[in-house]
Image (tube, coloured by chain):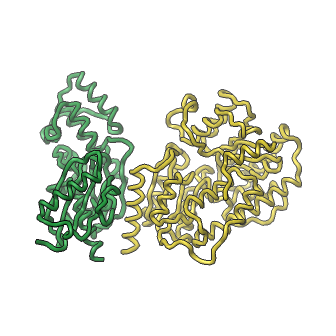
Chain colours: A green, B yellow
Amino acid sequence: MADNCFAGVDVGSLSTDVVIINASGKCLAEVVIATGLNGGETAQKAFDQSLNQAGLAQEQIKAVTATGYGRASVAFATGKTTEISCHGVGAHHLFPNTGTVIDIGGQDSKVIQVDERGRMLDFTMNDKCAAGTGRFLEVMAHRLELGLNELSDPLNIKGETVQISSTCTVFAESEVISLLAKQTPREQIVNGLQRSIVNRIWSMVTSIGIHGEVTLTGGVANNQGLVLVLEEKLGKKLNVPENPQTVGALGAAHIALRGYHK
Amino acid sequence: MIPNRKKYLKQQAQNGQKIMGVLPALYPRELLWAFDILPAEIWDPPGDILRANAHLQATICPIVKRGLEFILKESASVNAGYLFPHTCDSLQNLATQVKDLIGTSQPVYTFYNPKAQFNKTTRRYYLDLLQDFQTTLETKFGPLNRAKLMAACELGSKIDIRWLTLQNARRADQLELTNPEYFQLVRAGEYLKPEDYLTLLNQVEVQAGPVHQSNRRLLLSGILPPHEETLSFLDELSVTIVADDLLSGSRRFPITQLDTPVDPFEYLTDRHFLLPPCSTRASNLKERIHHLQKMISESQVHGVLFNIIKFCEPELFDHRFLVKTLKQNRVPLLSLETELLPGISGQDRTRIEAFIEMLDEQVSG
């Protein structure tokens, strides 16, 4: 049983993630639950589950860093840090040669440049529209009557494609409706949607530039079709963590650990 | 204590003061003062934009939209007409629309600032422009009193000198003002009578040494400062804006102190061409970057915050180049885009916090 443990709590728009690590940085628990109406309560619930998973008592957690849009609502946190910093730290911990982090979250997406020590050098973040975010994919999956897993199928991006707006979710959905009305095959529409989201991300990538290895974080990294399109655009392989959704919480836990030892 | 803009202007109008609504940004304020006209600048009047949208494209900046909305409301405080300086194409077109198409009960004046670098021709042009403006104002407000103009220039000069002192004190962290308080002070000059503004500036105490505990210092660039909530949020994060490159701020004050006015028109012309480089005057980009770099170095700031107004063409033309060059020179910067709405979005809070985290990491090494 570990005595000095540290937690990161990422209260995102779609999910709340908790990671607990020990003083050596070893991951002891990882929990993901849907963010409810009350971010603070959800955070507590996820935290309790993670303590259970790790077999720890709360007093063994020496520091908790909250992150994500709901970071201010985490009453038990000992510190808070933006998800931008946390994704940089988390990605660097998992892939030490990371120079660029692309985080595609539920309500926004970010591109973060980090140095060889995982310190943030520059970042950009979209927010004007859900285009280029996980929410965009959810809306489209619903419209196409597909599950997110089916939408992510890499086979969809092998064949023909159609062009879909990359600037607005609402207009993109209208385009999808028109395409369905024209009986365009669903795979082609999915292919077009994946490319649309990547085009949106790409404009942010080019504004920051690509440095070192590129690590993809956030729940959307589970979308294998999108990963393939993005790799095609980058011309190189992406680092995709086993649990991309919890990279922010992992980074937050490491920030808690660092802060404790300062 | 800074008088409330609306109440102050209402009171002035009730006292019989002539008030001219002035759209941004550069105009010979001293000439208006000499005609006993109080310029009340119209940058970002609050409220919803309702009627103006019917006359303007969706891609017009919110300053122009809010300006037209204000004009359409026919404010009782504006009783001496509206002045449209040539700041950008959108404001120039707005002048035409208001004058020739939409109409207003007030007379409409224009002032076509030169859009070229300083040389003999532009200097001559500006002198002629002042003469023409004087003639235009005389047809409505009677002959110009040269002694009054001279006194107005002297008063303007005192404001400029005091302002220069306060700017330097802010850089040295010798002003005990929060970020919102500092920019309220800057912006009070948009509507106070010059003598009231000078009194206000003179009341600001310059401390002997640094007053803020924070070592987080930023330079603010753009047209207007961010909304007060954003400025307060910067205070919460222990960030002090110690210098500005704002069109509504330091870009309207000469870089150096001018000699005491001798000939008013010569003085006003010299003053105009001694203003810092600005996108709305089509200043050379190299001059702009040089000026910014100088401010960054002299103010010892840790980074630059650009507050970009959506669809502001002149500023956006320069912004890309400025960002690219500053990044090449390893100056940390953050660009926020605003539609001049009240409050601060969660995303902007995250952007600002992340930027400060980035600065802290760089400072701590």
Q: Nearer the viewer, residue B202 or A236?
A: B202
Give coordinates of residue A102: x percent, y percent.
Answer: 27, 54
Q: Is residue A91 depicted above or below A145 in this figure?
A: below
Left or right of B192, for residue A205: left
The tally of labels here is: 0
Left or right of B334, for residue A49: left
- From where the camera sits, is residue A97 visible? no
Give coordinates of residue A31: x percent, y percent.
Answer: 17, 55
Q: Is residue B96 depicted above or below B175 in this figure?
A: above
Give the residue drawn at x 55%, y 66%.
B242
Q: In what quadrant of the picture does the C terminus of chain A appear?
A: bottom left
Q: Quadrant of residue A254?
A: bottom left
Left or right of B156, for residue B146: right
Give coordinates of residue A14: x percent, y percent.
Answer: 25, 46
Q: Nearer the viewer, residue A7 or A227?
A: A7
Q: In what quadrant of the picture does the N terminus of chain A appear?
A: bottom left
Give the residue drawn at x 32%, y 39%.
A166
Give coordinates of residue B348: x percent, y percent.
Answer: 42, 52
Q: Nearer the viewer, residue A56 or B170?
A: A56
- From where the camera sits, is residue B344 visible? yes
Give the residue drawn at x 63%, y 35%.
B94
Q: Nearer the viewer, residue B326 or A65?
A: A65
Left or right of B152, for residue A83: left
Give the residue drawn at x 66%, y 54%.
B188
